[in-house]
Amino acid sequence: MKLHVLIVEDNFFLAEELRHFVQDALLGVATTTNKASTAIDLIPDGIELAFLDIEVLDGNTYPVARLLRANHIPFIFVSGNDPNSLPDEFRHEPFLAKPYRESDLINLARSLTDTLH
């Protein structure tokens, strides 16, 4: 069974890089969007992990992160933002700064999904 991953990223090239990462390193299936509002509609569709850029085309992904957390779906902020700028409610969530090392992304994603498969 393949891991279903949501990618919320407004940079097309980074979204494609993450999509290939999901397919190749995690052996999963990725759904990508560049808007938080669209991501919210996708969460009930079997998503098991999410990669969230913080600032996307229609604002920020904090509402997406709240919904993911409420549904017990692990997520990783993958952003160029300063992690210290996160609201207090997200200070302890996984965060990878862009540019990230693929090995760090693999290790973090696998640590969050090992219990899923």
Image: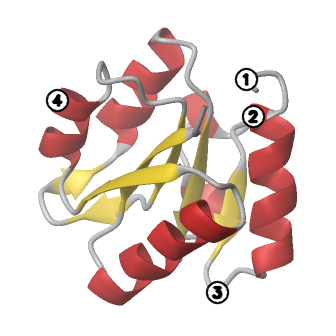
Question: Which callout, 1 or 3, points to the residue nearer the camera?
Answer: 1
Disc number placed over residue 113 in the picture, else none: 2
- The first of marks 2 and 3 along the sequence is 3
Residue 93, given in percent of the width and then of the height, sits at: 69, 38
Q: How many angstroms separate mark 2 from mark 1 (CA)?
A: 5 Å
Disc number placed over residue 41 in the picture, else none: 4
* Amino acid type, mark 3: Pro
Left or right relative to 114: residue 49: left
Q: How many angstroms separate mark 4 from mark 2 (CA)?
A: 22 Å
Residue placed under numbered mark 3 in the picture = 99
Q: Secondary structure at mark 4?
A: helix
Left or right relative to 76: residue 110: right
Quarter of the view holding residue 117: top right
* Amino acid type, mark 2: Thr
Disc number placed over residue 19 in the picture, else none: none
Disc number placed over residue 116 in the picture, else none: 1
Q: How many angstroms separate mark 4 from mark 1 (CA)?
A: 22 Å
Q: Residue furthest front?
A: 1
Q: How many angstroms separate mark 4 from mark 3 (CA)?
A: 28 Å
- CB contact under 8 Å: marks 1 and 3: no
Label 2: how many Cα within 10 Å (few below 14, some 14–19, many 20+): some
Q: How many angstroms separate mark 2 from mark 3 (CA)?
A: 22 Å
- CB contact under 8 Å: marks 2 and 1: yes
Q: Is residue 75 depicted above or below 104 in this figure?
A: above
* Amino acid type, mark 1: Leu
Residue 75, given in percent of the width and then of the height, sits at: 58, 39
Q: Nearer the viewer, residue 6 or 100?
A: 6
Label 3: how many Cα within 10 Å (few below 14, some 14–19, many 20+): few
